[in-house]
Amino acid sequence: MDRQDIAIVSQSTKNLAGSLSTVCAALQKQIMYHFGDVWGVKATVSVFPRLEVVPTGYWPIVIVDEVGDGNQHGIHQDDNGQPIALVRAAKDWSLAASHECLEMLADPWGKRLVTAPSMIDGQGQVQYLVECVDPCEASATAYRIDGVLVSDFCFPSYYGLDSGPRFSYSGRIQKQFEVLAGGYVSWHESITNHWFQCRNDDGIERILDVGELPPTGASLRVAIDAVSEKILRNQHPVRHVPRTPKKGPRSSAITRATRLARAERLQIIINRHSRSAN
């Protein structure tokens, strides 16, 4: 399996210097000992002081003071379609960083679908969006690595990608497509071309008809979350669930210029989706 490199960069005005390296080490352990073998991925996680020094090929997780509307957090894409994640510098920002890091590694482009029976009677076979954290994303199911809060996650068997007996790292998910309190799962139904979500709010499962997605060019994950967040904010009615080599000076100068140009493009995306706390 190929290795992917992840960069953590703080653009927050909050003093996170003391926690960045600690969170980075916890995420590295989570990938190495818990997540990587299960999902078939390898990754390194490193802290960088600013975007300009992040090497080309790294996928950034950027910590910002605030994000825009609810759909602006999470994984976005740069101009070349490569993933970049935004995380708000909240008290337990490590939980969100773990969430985005794991989902970035399992499905970088937010478009992976698997076919399985619908959770709604009569819909037949539908396509579920593979989001390895969302069904168990609440802090109640999180756990700690060296004191750092990290996210629980689903195993591939949750989506029927293998026949393993375990459905989540914590073991709290007991069956395929079970949604724990605070979590959700999304799927597409081909006949109506509608997307649906099963959401578990305080132990009550309900179905949200998201409808057809607008042609935004964004990943399915971003598009679905944008529409569903809007529906929930407007309180639309929902239905209950029926169930490196040494380089010479010229090469180094090109590398610096490449990193700077990429950082400028990424900054445009970050500014588009975030706002300063000042």
Image (cartoon, helix red, strand yellow):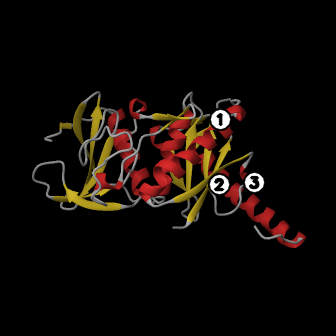
Q: Amino acid at mark 2?
A: Leu
Is any atom of residue 212 visible in this view?
A: no
**Mark 1 and mark 2: span between their CA atoms?**
16 Å
Query: x%, y% of residue 53?
Result: 76, 54
**Numbered disc 1: secondary structure:** loop
Determine which of the numbered discs, if any, sits on residue 52 in the image. 3
Quadrant containing the C terminus in the rendered view = top right
- Disc nearest the viewer among 3 and 2: 3
Mark 3 closeness class: few <14, some 14–19, many ≥20 residues within 10 Å: some
- Residue identifier under label 2: 266
Residue 120's spot in the image, x, y percent? 15, 48
x, y percentage for residue 116?
Answer: 22, 58
How would you rate the neighbour count of disc 1 (Cα within 10 Å): few for under 14, some for 14-19, many for 20 or more?
A: few
Report the residue at 27% width, 35% height from top: 236
Q: Is residue 220 visible?
A: yes
Where residue 276 is drawn, which disc sits there?
A: 1
* Above or below, comparing residue 20 to residue 15 in the picture: below
Residue 220 position within the rendered picture, expressed as x and y whole percent measured from the top left: 39, 56
> For the residues marked 3 and 1, what is the alpha-carbon distance in whole angstroms?
19 Å
**How far apart are labels 3 and 2 at the CA level?**
10 Å
Residue at the image point whose x is 66% and y is 34% from the top: 19
